[in-house]
Amino acid sequence: MNGLPPPLKDEIARKTYDALAFLCTGLDHGKLTKDQFSTGMDVVFLITAGLVPSDVIDAVTESQSTLAGHKTVERRSFVNRDMIMTFKRVAGEPKVTVTQWLAGVNHNETTREFLTSAEAAHFMKTVGDRLSRKGFSEL
């Protein structure tokens, strides 16, 4: 090690990969919508095109193509002193998975089935509102 910082081109490439990982993870975990992911990818491409090696731009372009067919996952998590409750729903599907952790241990996981995806969305909203009124904090 020579004590010099890495070349700027290498640092920009590294930060580009960090941004790709952040965006893809956010989409996969339901923290970003498809539109937010797409906008983020466009910004990464516009900022880095011409500044990073072509293999990095290829990775950006490939990551953008993963959006096709990707299903949006909605997650809501609530916590109080002893319990964490997480609700997960895939857009368009008529079911909600409810996971409860008690003292940090996965205590219970159930899937609630509904007649329509709108009913599943309504369930997540009303239960979330009810938990908030009971003193749970939404993460």
Image (tube, rainbow, N blue to C red):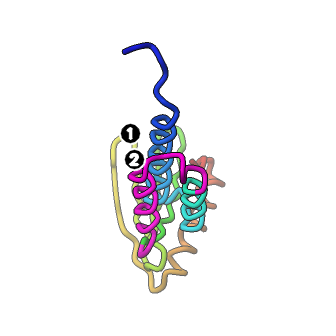
Disc 2 secondary structure class: strand
Please give the name of the residue rendered at 43% of the width and 78% of the height, measured from the top-left corner.
93
Residue 97 within the segment the image draws in magenta:
no
Residue 61 within the segment the image draws in magenta:
yes
Q: Indicate the position of residue 109 as horizontal and vertical percent values.
A: 34, 59
In this rendering, is residue 46 above or below 5?
Answer: below
Left or right: 90 as drawn, with respect to 134: left
Q: Are marks 2 and 1 in contact (CB under 8 Å)?
A: yes
- Label 1 amino acid? Gly
> Between residues 136 and 139, which one lies in front from this camera angle?
139
In this rendering, is residue 16 above or below 29?
Answer: above
Please give the name of the residue rendered at 51% of the width and 39% of the height, measured from the top-left corner.
12
Q: Residues within 10 Å of mark 2 (few under 14, many from 20)?
A: some
Q: Indicate the position of residue 118 as horizontal and vertical percent values.
A: 54, 81
Residue indicated by mark 1: 104
Q: Indicate the position of residue 49 as horizontal and vertical percent values.
A: 54, 53
Residue 92, numbered label:
none
Residue 67 in which image quadrant: bottom left
> Between residues 123 and 15, which one lies in front from this camera angle?
15
Magenta stretch: give its range: 46-69
Work out how far the residue at label 2 is from the one at label 1, CA to CA, in angstroms: 6 Å
Please give the name of the residue rendered at 62% of the width and 47% of the height, measured from the top-left corner.
135
- Label 2 amino acid? Trp
Examine the residues drawn in magenta and state their main secondary structure.
helix
Left or right: 9 as drawn, with respect to 43: left
Residue indicated by mark 2: 101
